[in-house]
Image: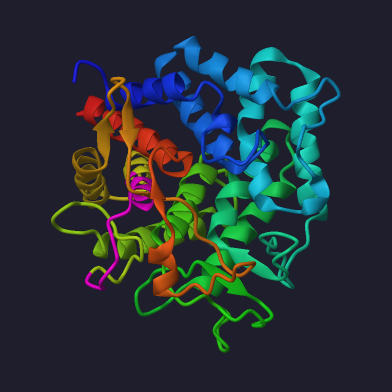
Amino acid sequence: MSTTWSVAMADSFIHKYPIVSDMPFQKRRCWNYENGCALTMLERLWYTTGDDRYYQYIKENIDLFIQPDGSIDTYELNEYNVDMINQGKSLFMLYDRTGEERYKKAIELLVTQLKGHPRTSEGGLWHKKIYPFQMWLDGVYMTSPLLAAYAQMFNESEWYDDVANEILLMEKVSRDPATGLLYHGWDETREERWADNETGCSPHFWSRAIGWYVMAIVDVLDYLPLEHPKRGQIVGIFYRLTQAVMKYQDAESGMWYQVTDLADRKGNYLEASGSSMFVYALAKGARKGYLGKDALAAARRGHAGLVERCVGKGEDGAYYLDHICSVAGLGNKPYRDGSFAYYISEPVRRDDPKGYAPFVMACLEIEAAASEN
């Protein structure tokens, strides 16, 4: 390639989807976490390349929602949904660059949600109001990096403690000692049909859920002060979990399966979003010194597998990323029981930002590692 994979993929995304919230599978134009994934991807690319096309894309897509008074169109605080926090991550960059108060007010609105957000008995954020006393791995990524950035930018250091508690609590309640992996969700009440009567955990390991969690940690560590009393423990958890993840990397493809530990079970498949998240976290963790050279080697194998098996080029000349699980959750209607059959039943699709964005960020990390050698 004459250009990097990160730039080629990002430029293809912008070409195909000038407004991310108008992607074909989005039900309506609204503030949501998938938008946030795409904008975070482009923010990283802007910092790396300095190309203002990426900044303009972020600003135009954010400005569809941020009103002059700092309110956010289509966002409902009282839904108490952690997913709605993720799109706010780019507001810090916009506020820093423009100084416009509406961006700061929008950040504060999202933090206001988290101040009053319902919590478990030990202070863990419920995933959503409609999922009482449940914590999901996904939610740590939606909230913790934004709160850590808020603590840093506005000198509100108590949020560092809250973020550290969220990361540590999620690991404590969801970790399986036999595999070292983390279960997708946990119900403190044990009332959900998917919850184990003893542990409260859902029954399987979903690669994307674990991916969200390891991405959350490696991004939070960008902000968490070196002297924070829980920092070493969080780095240790990150190391322990990534060591477990690497054991389940497919030797032939370098990728990971949809249900992480059941590679040989019929119907399981190599999945792009979880694999991309692992590649990103392993490569960034190695670059930052949290992980060793084995992690970077695993990341490179994973990246090569993704390029070979999941990247394609359409008739319009634009690249796409395929084999992305569309969605997976727990409970609700129709009821999602967390079974193996459930995880492999959800459809796969191309270009979903939940896979595309981590892939581009993984490319940036692999390219950074190559430039250092």
* Direction bottom: furthest residue: 198
Q: Relative to 238, does residue 182 appear above or below in the rendering? A: below
- Looking at the image, how many numbered discs can be counted on the residues? 0
* Among the 4 quarters of the image, the one containing residue 225: top right
* Among the 4 quarters of the image, the one containing residue 342: bottom left
* Residue at x 47% of width, y 58% of height: 209
* Residue at x 56% of width, y 14% of height: 56
Q: Is residue 141 magenta?
A: no
Query: Along the horizontal axis of the image, is 151 left or right of 297?
Result: right
Residue 136 locus on image (x, y percent): 58, 63
| Front-lying residue, 176 or 373 | 176
Q: Relative to 342, does residue 64 appear above or below in the rendering? A: above
**Residue 176 visible somewhere in the drawing:** yes
Q: Relative to 67, does residue 154 appear above or below in the rendering? A: below
Q: Is residue 265 magenta?
A: yes
Residue 298 locus on image (x, y percent): 23, 50
**Residue 229 visible somewhere in the drawing:** no
Query: Along the horizontal axis of the image, is 61 left or right of 49?
Result: right
* Direction left: furthest residue: 252
Residue 223 locus on image (x, y percent): 57, 39
Q: Which residues are magenta?
A: 264-279
* Residue at x 43% of width, y 55% of height: 208
Q: Quadrant of the C terminus?
A: top left
* Direction top: furthest residue: 52
Query: Along the horizontal axis of the image, is 302 left or right of 105?
Result: left
Residue 231 locus on image (x, y percent): 53, 53
Check the image and tell me how it is coloured: rainbow
Q: Quadrant of the N terminus?
A: top left
* Residue at x 34% of width, y 27% of height: 9
